[in-house]
Image (cartoon, helix red, strand yellow):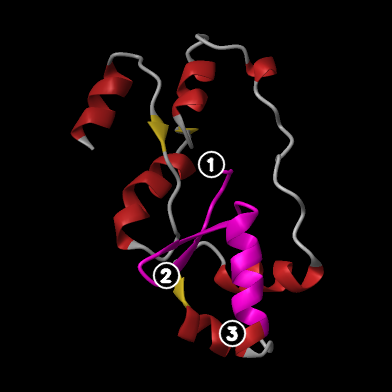
Amino acid sequence: MHTVAEAERRGRTVFAAPGPVRSAASAGTNRLLRDGAHVVCDAGDVLVALGLSSALSRSLRDPRPAPSPEDAEVLDAIGWAPRSLDGLALRVPNSLGQLALALSRLCDQGWLVERSGWYERVARSER
């Protein structure tokens, strides 16, 4: 937080990337956001805030297809924290086969990524 204090002392803009609210690793950046720091999710956000890129050139529409109601239920069960297949099976009423298919579709559409057996939600398509 010394860097933040020095940036504020010099009149510099402070940016922070949001993180899961239950993660201790995100407590500092989430506190900065609460206190008025600018939200940044990628390098484009910084460029736009600094006037180095036009905000109009960025699409506000999410290019991913909307998930089906069944897939949206799985997406909601994941939330914004990584989840294992076992953990998800306890959170959704679908059969294991239906859940596996939904996870596959959500990954293919760019809503999720699977890393070492854990499924994580993607804010915007990383593909």
Q: Name the residue under label 2.
A: 118
Task: List x then y, in percent, for residue 82.
Answer: 44, 67
* Mark 2–mark 3 distance (CA, rounded to whole Å): 15 Å
Front label number (1 vs 2): 1
Q: Is residue 73 visible?
A: yes
Q: Mark 1 points at which residue?
A: 127
Outermost residue to the top: 52
Secondary structure, mark 3, is helix
114 w.r.t. 30: above or below: below
Q: Which amino acid does label 1 sit on?
A: Arg
Q: In which quarter of the image is residue 12?
A: top left
Residue 84 horizontal side relative to residue 116, left or right? right
Of residue 43 and residue 102, the one placed in the foreground of this image is 102
Q: Residues within 10 Å of mark 2 (few under 14, many from 20)?
A: some
Task: List x then y, in percent, for residue 126.
Answer: 51, 42
Image: magenta residue range? 98-127
Q: Which amino acid does label 2 sit on?
A: Trp
Q: Name the residue under label 3.
A: 91
* Mark 1–mark 2 distance (CA, rounded to whole Å): 18 Å
State which tag comes first along the sequence, 1 or 3. 3
Query: What's the residue at 64%, 17% (across, down)?
Result: 55
Of residue 9 and residue 87, the one placed in the foreground of this image is 87
Front label number (2 vs 3): 2
